[in-house]
Amino acid sequence: MGKGSAKIENTIRTLRFHAGEMTQAALAEKVGVTRQTIVAMEQGRYSPSLEVAFRVARAFDVPLEQVFHYRGETE
């Protein structure tokens, strides 16, 4: 479920840049995951659980939809 070809795209890298060039390690600490998890999400190799997705959005103080976008079968 969480690994493999993700259909969930994200803007984490862009949001980190706009948040004063926040490091992956700093975001990982805020979210409560490892830096490697942040790397995998940014690269589209890992789709986070719903709870982690909300924590990422909360770390940037933006709506979930601004961070994650589901690329379904029809897109």
Image (cartoon, rainbow, N blue to C red):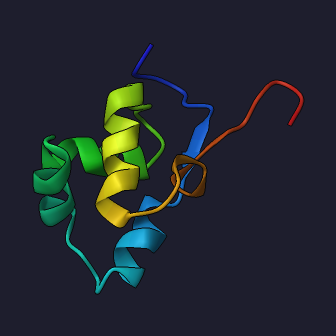
As drawn, the residue found furthest toward the top would be 1
Residue 61 location in percent, x, y? 39, 64
Q: Is residue 10 left or right of residue 75?
A: left
Q: Is residue 7 left or right of residue 35?
A: right
Depicted 12 relative to depicted 4: above or below = below
Depicted 5 relative to depicted 42: above or below = above
Q: Residue at x 62, y 32 (%)?
A: 7
Quarter occupied by the C terminus: top right
Q: Residue at x 89, y 29 (%)?
A: 74
Residue 71 location in percent, x, y? 72, 36
Depicted 14 relative to depicted 35: above or below = below
Q: Is residue 33 left or right of residue 7?
A: left
Q: Nearer the viewer, residue 19 or 46?
A: 19
As drawn, the residue found furthest toward the right would be 74
Residue 58 location in percent, x, y? 34, 54
Residue 18 location in percent, x, y? 41, 82
Quarter occupied by the N terminus: top left
Q: Residue at x 29, y 51 (%)?
A: 39
